[in-house]
Image (cartoon, grey):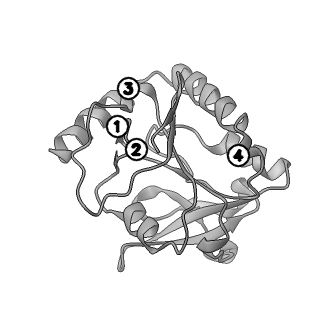
Amino acid sequence: MKQRIREEILGLRGEIPSSQKSEHSHSIFQKLIGLDFFKTSQNIMAYVAFRNEVDTLPVIRHCLSESKRIIVPMTVPKTRELLLSELKDPERDLRPGTFGVPEPAPEFIRPFPAQDLDLILVPGVAFDEQGFRIGYGAGYYDRFFDRLTRKIPSIGLAFELQIIDRVPAEPTDQPVDFIITENRLIDCR
């Protein structure tokens, strides 16, 4: 079931014209930076977009210009876990990593402790209004959330077409607290 939804939504997301994707990403960016808890967050974990995801580079650049710390995930395929690294310069520091996802090159890895995060921006293929998500199928984020020693607010960034009625959630699935689309902010708590 998840695989069928994943294929369908990835197909739809891939059909969004690049100008519309940029426009929608900008709208999502504006909603995000307007949130009080975003404004007060200093250590923000942000994914680096790929494969037609909501573009996060404007968020990353904005945070860096505001002297916020941007933390990006790095995947470890052997253990299927996410490690964190502080990002200082997206143009210089990033290279295609596992699955082609931009990650810090080895010389730019700056380990960061997860417990020091204030906010987590979460990618996904599909979300429901309860905050459950379908990712790319490897469970990296669910395992990451499960290992956190305290609750850290999480926001899924998605285009409206990625919101579905119900994600077939499993006991290991970890919902996000909020979802921002180009049209709305969904409080999933």
For marks 4 and 1 on the same chain, the one whose residue lies earlier in the sequence:
4
- Front position among marks 1 and 3: 1
> Closer to the camera: disc 4 or disc 3?
4
Q: Residue at label 1? A: 128
Tell me which residue sits at (69%, 67%) in the image. 86
Residue that label 2 marks: 131
Q: Residue 170's spot in the image, x, y percent? A: 23, 57
Going from N to C along the chain, the mark reached first, 4 or 2, is 4
Q: CA distance from mark 4 to mark 2?
A: 18 Å
Q: Secondary structure at mark 3?
A: helix
Q: Residue at the spot x=73%, y=54% of the render?
A: 41
Q: Along the polypeptide, which appears first: circle 1 or circle 3?
A: 1
Quadrant location, the N terminus: top left
Q: Are marks 2 and 1 in contact (CB under 8 Å)?
A: yes
Identified by mark 4, the residue type is: Phe
Q: Judge whether 23 appears above or below 143 on screen.
A: above
Q: Quadrant for residue 5, please give it.
A: top left
Numbered tag placed on residue 161 in the rendering: 3
Q: Which residue is mark 4?
A: 38
Q: Residue 151's quadrant in the figure?
A: bottom right
Label 1 – label 3 distance at C-alpha: 11 Å
Q: Residues within 10 Å of mark 4 (few under 14, many from 20)?
A: some
Q: In the rendered view, would you say 149 is above or below 28?
A: below
Amino acid of disc 1: Asp
Query: Percent x, y for residue 13?
Result: 38, 31
Q: Residues within 10 Å of mark 3 (few under 14, many from 20)?
A: some
